Amino acid sequence: MFESLFQLRAAQTSVRTEMLAGLTTFLTMASILFVNPEILAQAGMDHGAVFVATCLAAAIGSAVMGLLANYPIAQAPGMGINAFFTFGLVKGLGMSWQTALGAVFVSGVLFMLVSVTRLREGFVNGIPLSLKQAISAGVGLFIALIALQQAGVVVANPDTLVGLGDLHKPQPLLALAGFALIVTLERWRVPGAILLGILVITTVSVLLGLTPYTGVFALPPSLAPTWLQLDIPGALAPAVLSVVLGFFLMSLTETSGTLIAVAQRGPFLDAQGRLPRLNRALLADSTAISVGALLGTSSTTSYLESSTGIAAGGRTGLTAVTVAVLFLASLFFAPLAATIPVWATAPALVYVAMLMLKGFALLNWDDITEAAPALLCALTMAFTFSIADGIAFGAIAFVALNLAAGRRQQIGWPVALIAGVFVLKYVLG
């Protein structure tokens, strides 16, 4: 059965190797089980229901990727996008979490249509590389600021907007220690470094009496508080369309970038440097986004951590299906997820932010028409608490500067479309 589904012999692998690779991938990304419910609960969503939705969305997304595209690439709700959901939309714009879920669903459907009609390649290639890198770096700054604020390391200041928190309190010290621990474990290539960091800080917090211990195992909580609670008509309102566009762009660029990056680490690219079955992989991703919204979680995406499973020998979709099974088994760990405090998950967010900031290093700083819009995009995201506005400022600046420089041919139709949509949004209010 495995041979007929995944062509193991052709990939020169075995069931045992694929399953061990799946376990490796799962350990490196399992922290999302604890981080995602913590972040979305701050949007007013039920913590237990979001935990179940996270498990199911990750399991469904990974299984579809493995069975449909036959790639060892796992999926789960994305870090950064969940922060955008809670702090950018619900808390920043005052949007209901139901409408935000509707925006996730609509963006998933749009992503699916782009994948099916093969518009994806033209759309992705039409967005300048500098803006893609800036979106990644800007989201990194955005979630780093949120994580440091949650941990008490950064606090509000009436004179300077932000300031240093009280380091005499244990919570910010534990968060800083957690970050140091994760980085150290990653330096020594310890599998599951992020997960171990979260669990160690949680254990210390329980021992110090800072957070109550609620157990480890239990039957899964009810999914009812989030199941089919999305507001699709609200998401189709003109004022929310820019949010849908933001979700769409983040999902499209992040998924495309992750797929190519993971493919480069494994023997998946063809002689022309293209990824076979790319449309199937994108279709799996977009399906997972829409299904996740129905379940009650922010956008699902392909995980770069899948490269750890590939390094362990994963070559087929059986690796991703193994990850799916492990996420289903995680449904019985809801009490542990409820025990983990925000200062234990904050270090994981800061670490992910650090990885995303690599985009700045790849920018062409010698070309001001590339660097200036990218920097404006990233800074606007972080300091306005809005990823959508960051994308808008970056796109508008890119079009305006290239027109002023007489480089009209550098402006692709996707970035011109994005800039035009946001200009209309700002003009019409």
Image (cartoon, grey):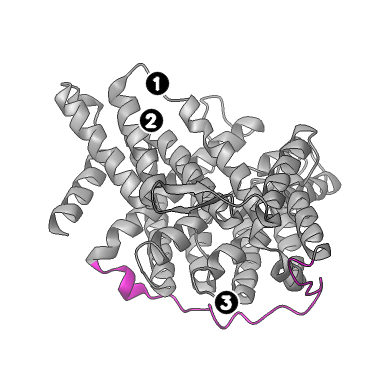
Q: CA distance from mark 1 to mark 2?
A: 8 Å
Q: Which mark is drawn over residue 364?
A: 1
Mark 2 Cα shell of 10 Å, populated few (<14), some (14-19), many (≥20) = many
Let me know if residue 234 is in the magenta part.
Answer: yes
- Amino acid type assigned to the residue bearing label 3 in the image: Asp
Q: Earlier in the sequence, mark 1 or mark 3?
A: 3
Q: Is residue 1 visible?
A: no
Q: CA distance from mark 1 to mark 3?
A: 44 Å
Image height of 17 relative to 218, above or below: above
Where is mark 3, residue-wise? 46
User: Residue 31 location in percent, x, y?
Assistant: 69, 55
Q: Amino acid at mark 1?
A: Asn
Labelled pair 1, 2 in contact (Cβ < 8 Å): yes
Residue receiving disc 2? 130
Q: Which residues are magenta?
A: 209-237
Three-letter amino acid code at the position of disc 2: Ser
Comes first in the chain, label 1 or label 2: 2
Mark 2 or 3: the one toward you: 3
Q: Residue at x 42, y 45 (%)?
A: 382
Can you say which quadrant of the picture contains the C terminus?
Answer: bottom left
Q: Position of residue 412 (x, y in %)?
A: 26, 34
Magenta stretch holds residue 230 = yes
Per the image, label 3 sits on a secondary structure element best described as loop
Q: Locate residue 125: give its quadrant.
A: top left
* Viewer-proximal residue among 92 and 301: 92
The image quadrant that residue 407 belongs to is top left
Mark 1 crowdedness (10 Å alpha carbons): few <14, some 14-19, many ≥20: some
